[in-house]
Image: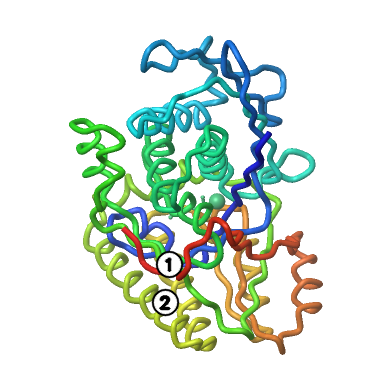
């Protein structure tokens, strides 16, 4: 029996712009996980998830084909991760055995509400890692990222895959999205193994070290939001608003690059200034596209933090889910938390999750 875990994530900056290839964002991995336990078994393969406990996903191997019987939509990401990883492993001449996956999630609240921590990305990453481990094949982080990105993209179709990068690399990362059109076109003419082996245009992942005095607070609105819906609405509007949208992309690039530089310089004040600036850019995008990114509740959350000397913004697609605040050791956290409570905002007790030693690189660095 082997066990692997993949964490959830939160966006810190660069949302919406990062959906366009070559545009950067900053994310953290948080210490809530999807866990997969796996063991080899005979006759057929199967997966059980506590997210849909009533039934199992089962599959057989017919030559090089994976045959699900029957295919269950609730297991879309799991099934896609299985197909992608098994195809990759076959190309590495790894014999595919039958196995069982038991998938459990900490990424939703106790009463089943979602926090917006990216459970589909984490489940995809966890399944890729579990399959490689149960068949005894060592994979590096960039390969896990590429396999999980291919599997995730073929189900969802429209995200930046920053959530997958955060779940694989963990800690604080700067992520620049790759060209998804290039990837889909490449996959149409090449195998997964060939595609994973080459550099992906625009992809960059860099580990960031936060200044020692930096603290991140996560405020949960208690209201789930649909990322796919919000991203789709902004995408529909961007054609009519091309001048505004191009300006937004340039300004977001500049802002996030300054923030990345501020991380390298351990300059907390400059990080906070860019958080303020990114908030304003997202509010302007919301006004122009008529998409509710910073809801009234998220606005309260940010204004309270500003009044008490920190910097805050909506996280991810917004419209609910979580906001993030960047504060220092002197900030009156009790006061922030008490005032958040008046607006039904809960401080989530999350910490940044880092890769365990055996999985991490010797040195954090850019990869593509
Ligand atoms: O709402 P979240 O945490 O899933 O973040 C979405 C971030 C976007 O940039 C809006 C979309 C994306 O895929 O990057
Ligand atoms: Mg969200």
Establish if 186 lies above or below 170.
Answer: above
Q: Are the two marked residues, 1 and 2, in contact with CB atoms closer than 8 angstroms?
A: yes
Q: Image point 43% across, 60% down: which residue?
A: 15
Query: Mark 1 or 2 closer to N-term?
Result: 1
Q: Does residue 87 appear to the left or right of 121 in the view shown?
A: left
Label 2: few (<14), some or many (≥20) within 10 Å? many
Q: Nearer the viewer, residue 127 or 139?
A: 139
Q: Image point 65% across, 68% down: which residue?
A: 300
Q: Image point 65% across, 49% down: which residue?
A: 115
Which quarter of the picture shows residue 155? Answer: top left
Using the numbered discs, state the Cα–Cα distance from disc 1 to disc 2 in whole angstroms.
Answer: 7 Å
User: What SS does tag 2 mark?
Assistant: helix
Residue 13 percent across, percent down from the top left: 47, 67
Residue 337 percent across, percent down from the top left: 77, 71
Label 1: few (<14), some or many (≥20) within 10 Å? many
Q: Which mark is residue 260?
A: 2
Q: Does residue 297 appear to the left or right of 97 in the view shown?
A: right
Q: Which mark is residue 174?
A: 1
Which quarter of the picture shows residue 308? Answer: bottom right
Establish if 33 lies above or below 219.
Answer: above
Q: Nearer the viewer, residue 346 or 355?
A: 355
Residue 295 percent across, percent down from the top left: 58, 58
Q: Which mark is residue 257?
A: none
Q: Image point 64% across, 72% down: which residue?
A: 216
Q: On the rendered image, what quadrant is the C terminus found in?
A: bottom left
Q: What colour-coding does the image apply?
A: rainbow
């Amino acid at each position: 029996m082997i066990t692997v875990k993949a964490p959830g994530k939160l966006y810190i900056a660069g949302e919406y712009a990062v959906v366009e290839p070559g545009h950067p964002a900053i994310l953290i991995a948080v210490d809530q996980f999807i866990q997969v336990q796996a063991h080899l078994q005979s006759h057929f393969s199967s997966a059980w998830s506590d997210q849909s406990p009533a039934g199992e996903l089962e599959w057989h191997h017919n030559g090089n084909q994976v045959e699900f019987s029957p295919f269950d939509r609730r297991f879309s990401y799991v099934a896609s991760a299985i197909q992608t990883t098994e195809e990759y492993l076959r190309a590495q001449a790894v014999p595919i055995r039958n196995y069982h996956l038991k998938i459990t999630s900490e990424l939703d609240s106790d009463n089943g509400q979602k926090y917006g921590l990216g459970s589909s990305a984490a489940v995809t990453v966890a399944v890729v890692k579990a399959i490689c481990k149960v068949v005894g094949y060592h994979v590096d982080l960039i390969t896990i990222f590429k396999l999980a990105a291919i599997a995730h993209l073929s189900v969802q179709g429209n995200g930046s895959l920053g959530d997958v990068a955060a779940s694989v690399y963990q800690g604080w990362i700067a992520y620049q999205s790759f060209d998804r059109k290039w990837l889909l076109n490449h996959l149409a003419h090449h195998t997964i193994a060939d595609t994973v082996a080459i550099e992906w245009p625009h992809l960059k992942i860099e580990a960031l070290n936060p200044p020692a005095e930096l603290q991140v607070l996560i405020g949960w609105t208690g209201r789930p939001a649909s990322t796919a819906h919000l991203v789709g609405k902004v995408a529909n509007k961007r054609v009519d608003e091309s001048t505004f949208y191009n300006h937004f992309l340039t300004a977001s690039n500049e802002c996030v690059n300054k923030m990345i530089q501020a991380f390298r310089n351990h300059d907390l004040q400059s990080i906070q200034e860019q958080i303020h600036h990114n908030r304003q850019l997202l509010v302007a995008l919301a006004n122009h596209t008529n998409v509710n990114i910073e809801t009234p509740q998220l606005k309260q959350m940010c204004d309270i933090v500003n009044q008490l000397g920190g910097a805050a913004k909506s996280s991810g697609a917004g419209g609910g889910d979580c906001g993030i605040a960047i504060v220092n050791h002197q900030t009156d956290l009790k006061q922030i938390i008490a005032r958040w409570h008046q607006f039904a905002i809960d401080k989530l007790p999350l910490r940044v999750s880092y890769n365990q030693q055996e999985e991490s690189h010797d040195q954090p660095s850019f990869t593509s």
